[in-house]
Image (spheres, rainbow, N blue to C red):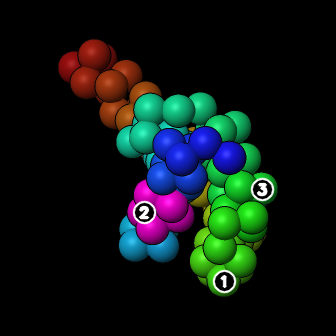
């Protein structure tokens, strides 16, 4: 594996362990796709550091378990904001 890829995988794993960011957030920070982050943390990290992989995997499982809650909350806020804008325009 290329040393720059190994370095990126280690940086990503350290970041997620420190911040608990989502894959989407990390993709923006590291300027790569969500697929790349996912592959780095699910496949490549297991080859590099199994102990760190287990800890990262727990965080990713947690994000998977609560994604329906986050999605529902985002939708609620979207419509709340839309309704506020509508009432402001009516005044």
Name the spot of residue 36 as percent of width and height, x first.
65, 39
Task: Please tell me whether residue 84 is drawn above or below residue 42 in the rendered image.
Answer: above
Per the model, the C-alpha gap separating discs 2 and 1 is: 15 Å
Decide which of tag 2 and tag 3 comes sooner along the chain: 2
Q: Look at mark 2 in the image and give the residue it sits on.
A: 15
Dots 3, 1 in contact, CB < 8 A: no
Which is nearer the eye, 70 or 43?
A: 43
Dot 2: what SS? helix
Alpha carbon separation for disc pair 3 and 1: 13 Å
Q: Secondary structure at mark 1?
A: helix
Seen as rendered, the residue at the extreme top is 89
Q: How many marks?
A: 3
Residue 83 shown in magenta: no
Q: Give the residue pinned by disc 1.
A: 51
Badge 2: residue crowd in 10 Å (few <14, some 14–19, many ≥20): some
- Region rendered in magenta: 10-16
* Residue 46 percent coordinates (x, y): 74, 67
Are dots 2 and 1 in contact, CB under 8 Å?
Answer: no
Q: Which residue is mark 3?
A: 43
**Label placed on residue 5:** none
Q: Residue at x 39, y 42 (%)?
A: 29
Q: Position of residue 13 (x, y in %)?
A: 53, 64
Instruction: Give the secondary structure at mark 3.
Output: helix
Residue depicted at x 61% and y 77%: 52
Q: How far is disc 2 from disc 3 in space, using C-alphas?
A: 17 Å
Q: Earlier in the sequence, mark 3 or mark 1?
A: 3
Q: Closer to the camera: disc 2 or disc 1?
A: 1
For label 1, the crowd category at 10 Å Cα-Cα, with few meaning under 14, some 14 to 19 and many 20 or more, is few
């Amino acid at each position: 594996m290329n040393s720059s890829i190994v370095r990126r995988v280690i940086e990503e794993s350290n970041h997620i362990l420190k911040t608990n960011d989502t894959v989407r957030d990390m993709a923006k920070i590291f300027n790569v796709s969500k697929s790349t982050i996912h592959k780095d943390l699910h496949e490549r990290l297991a080859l590099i550091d199994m102990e760190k992989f287990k800890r990262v995997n727990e965080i990713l499982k947690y994000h998977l378990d609560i994604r329906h809650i986050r999605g529902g909350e985002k939708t609620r806020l979207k419509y709340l904001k839309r309704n506020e804008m509508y009432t402001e325009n009516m005044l």
